[in-house]
Image (cartoon, grey):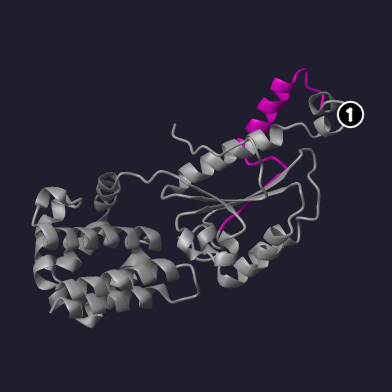
Amino acid sequence: MKSIKIPENQIYNAYLIEGEDMELLKSSAMEFTAKLLSRDPSSMDTGAMPIYQQRGYVSREKWADSVRKRVQNHEHPDMLEIMPNKPEEHPTIISVDNIRDHVTDTVAVRPYEAAYKVYLIEHAEMMNPQAQNAILKTLEEPPEYVVIMLLAVNADAFLPTILSRVIEIKAGERDVRERYAEMISEEWAQETVKLLSEIRFRTGREILDFCTHVSKDWKVPQGSLLGFLEIILRDVLCYKSTSQMELLYAQDSVNVIIRMASAMSYEKLGQATDDLERMLRDQTFNVNRDLMLENFLLRLRDTSI
């Protein structure tokens, strides 16, 4: 199984682990957490009984195995997990109340049994500005035993003051063709390609209906849709510049790519790319995502006429 190497020679109070595969980020962070929580706090006191003996284990290895299993089962008292609000739907935001209740109001409580107290914040890019400012206070003066791990797919969503106080670790990106092949098997991606192929002829009502299907019926995560559109626009620009179909990632959408490349000038392509980058930056803030997507597609339609 793939994993992300997190240095263990020196432990920091805050990490930002960025990558496209959230499951990989979580599994790697939990593996690192298990190692942290297996460290013996009694080793800091030469006269103290080893932790494994205090807990009734016959060896340090048995103790470490117990820690690892409890971390994997999400049962360790010194590992706290924070997720976006309403996780049963596609992630929306991590609110300031979420951060206050689970991080800032609890950091003063020392670890129950380990040398560290670890906070895993899943989809940390979903923290709104108020939540980021709330956690910033902890990042500025963290207790020595606190380790905060921000797991994110988009580091651009963070305030500069957050980025200046974390150790950044970036996972290797998945092969773009692999990502595209995975997404194009989904109905929403196929319908997106169909919309793009006919976007010059679509009415505002039809575009609005598509945006509603994306969020309400298909429940497509915003990051997935924007990532898909990013691949398409990259291919359009690539084909317009080179006319070489073999360089395209979206091989089964070549006709759409060629049609869009023919209809859009370099200036219009640049505008569309800028719009998409803005959406990628703003997706974590309190904006109407349906409206944001609708405006992008309407502008794309108008640039293709």
Residue 176 as seen in the image, left or right of residue 46: left
* Residue drawn at point x = 24 percent, y = 81 percent: 205
Front residue (pair 252, 148): 148
Mark 1 closeness class: few <14, some 14–19, many ≥20 residues within 10 Å: few
Q: Quadrant of residue 121?
A: bottom right
- x and y percent of residue 271 in the render? 26, 75
In the image, is residue 28 above or below residue 43?
below
* Residue drawn at point x = 63 percent, y = 41 percent: 74
In the image, is residue 252 above or below residue 286?
above
Residue 102 as seen in the image, left or right of residue 267: right
* Residue drawn at point x = 29 percent, y = 77 percent: 208
Q: Quadrant of residue 230?
A: bottom left
Residue 86 as seen in the image, left or right of residue 287: right
Label 1's element?
loop
The residue to which callout 1 is attached is 48
Residue 124 as seen in the image, left or right of residue 181: right
The magenta-colored residue range is 55-83
